[in-house]
Image: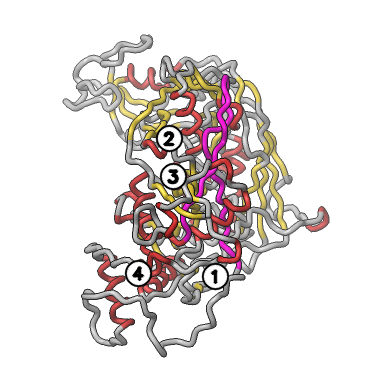
Amino acid sequence: MLLASAVVVWEWLNEHGRWRPYSPAVSHHIEAVVRAGPRAGGSVVLGQVDSRLAPYIIDLQSMNQFRQDTGTLRPVRRNYYDPTSAPAKGVVWEWENDNGSWTPYDMEVGITIQHAYEKQHPWIDLTSIGFSYIIDFSTMGQINRQTQRQRRVRRRLDLIYPMVTGALPKAQSWPVSPVSAASPPAPPCSCPQCVLVMSVKAAVVNGSTGPLQAPTARKNMPPSGAVKLPPPAGPGGKPLDSTGTIRGPVKTAPSQAIRRQASSTPAGATAGSPASPPGANGKNGRVALATLNRTNLQRLAIAQSRVLIASGVPTVPVKNLNGSSPVNPALAGITGILMSAAGLPVCLTRPPKLVLHPPPVSKSEIKSIPGVSNTSRKTTKKQAKKGKTPEEVLKKYLQKVRHPPDEDCTICMERLTAPSGYKGPQPTVKPDLVGKLSRCGHIYHIYCLVAMYNNGNKDGSLQCPTCKTIYGVKTGTQPPGKMEYHLIPHSLPGHPDCKTIRIIYSIPPGIQGPEHPNPGKSFSARGFPRHCYLPDSEKGRKVLKLLLVAWDRRLIFAIGTSSTTGESDTVIWNEVHHKTEFGSNLTGHGYPDANYLDNVLAELAAQGISEDSTAQEKD
């Protein structure tokens, strides 16, 4: 029997298809529940270890992260990396966001950077793993190969991720019985949620119908005679979806590193524990990780993932969390917690399926939208109106204040009775002049308002920095592209009585103009064409008409830094949310969503677009 070791990192799948690591502390917490076996209930409450993750629960049966307040599901996985790599040493590599906070790299990227750092290379090119960046260790900077934009990076130490050591079982032994079930139970957590869970479990096990009380002992037996259950799945049952890939340092420039592979014990056995296999300390020493083939690694991952369903207790699924059931997703999540407390593994989905696009539609089935002219619209770069200075533009929005109040100008934070404290390029107006915006009544140094206007889009509009009231017609910096819209003969979840409006945005990559962050540099356009969906209802058509106004005013997209991938100089959404999932809501960007249409109307209003705007566009 072969023995090997690996470092375990728990990861979740974001909406862009990238696996993001949980922190070492969260991974240790999940791993502790896995190793506790079925007695832990099959669900992991992440808020117990990180208060920022309070709404989230991981269901180990379906390998999904479940958000209790929204019902959003995301796949999770238990991934294995080389025991000499960065996560095994507690090393975390991070890059600095535009807002000054730090974001960790994906685990494979961090491992690649650390490997080059340990080899004392002066730099590492990440192109080989799909990222157009160079990490310069001498300056601790990240350089975009296309734009040459630089960001700071840092290397910090954190907890070491959990390690697993053990034997690779034979193929016919799956699923194996959890050997860790005989270990003594850990003391229960005292948080209110766990007290509730343990109380329900004790009440169900003891057959009690009285008030729930904190349990004094924990048992592994399900209640007898409580419900008629189907027979448990046998060894031939369908395994969970898990790749089991062991990731180590990947090929790098200028040197290459050998990818290693690792394995761990089935059913949560750990090194040095009473559950370790008899040969753990005998003749069968550890072998080189590279000797384990992919088939064996997949078996290993399946065994680790199935630790909580190998006890013979049948699965009781909570079905239809995608909107086809009247059961609220959050309620279904609480139901899952209580069922797991009673010793029943819970399947929150069966399984979740991402449905981005509708069934195929022929050209003859695509129809124009009643009340909306044409089926497409293009936009080009629109330059600001010439001939008016910033002072002339602001003059029509302001009233001069001869006797300013003794309060701060919220732009420069100097008193209004004193000259402006702005230290940038000097406007032509006097620094002690004060003006009041005509509609909202907020008062500022005119000097500061001119400077703010010069730093913006200079399109003839002004937005109050205090209350966000818009003066004039606000426009954006969206690059040229095309917007198509039409009806398709399919219904969205939650809108069974109407067809669907499909919007297709197409924006090609290009060169940034003077209104963009880096004029003259190229910008990328990832994920186009982008398909978005609205119900063909009265309110849905209203939203479409306002989106057309937003498109004409170049407010749907902008050029900036992606908050998800960290890529700079790329096309990003501009604060008007769209639904990009047709038949599901796994990422939170789909249906059903009872509040979406009202929310997007509010977002459009914040951009200065309302029903009055459609009349202005016609004029």
- Mark 3 closeness class: few <14, some 14–19, many ≥20 residues within 10 Å: many
Give whichever of 589, 123 is nearer the camera: 123
Secondary structure of residue under mark 1 = loop
Q: Position of residue 432 (x, y in %)?
A: 26, 14
Whether label 1 touches label 3, CB < 8 Å: no
Q: Quadrant of residue 404?
A: top left
Read off the residue under disc 2: 86
Q: Where is residue 358 in the image (x, y as percent from the top left)?
A: 69, 57
Mark 4 and mark 3 lie on one chain; the one further toward the N terminus is 3
Whole-angstrom CA distance, mark 2 to mark 4, is 33 Å
Read off the residue under disc 4: 182
Mark 1 is on which residue type?
Answer: Asn
Res 320 label: 1
Whether label 2 touches label 4, CB < 8 Å: no
Whole-angstrom CA distance, mark 4 to mark 3, is 24 Å
Question: Which tag is nearer the camera, tag 4 or tag 1?
Answer: 4
Read off the residue under disc 3: 7
Mark 2 and mark 4 lie on one chain; the one further toward the N terminus is 2
- Mark 2 closeness class: few <14, some 14–19, many ≥20 residues within 10 Å: many
Task: Classify residue 397 as left or right of residue 257.
Answer: left
For residue 253: magenta?
Answer: yes
Secondary structure of residue under mark 4 = helix
**What range is drawn magenta here?**
238-266
Res 463 label: none
Q: Residue extending furthest bottom?
A: 225
Task: Name the residue rendered at 41%, 35% in the picture.
Answer: 103
Mark 3 is on which residue type?
Answer: Val
Mark 2 is on which residue type?
Answer: Ala
Mark 4 is on which residue type?
Answer: Ala
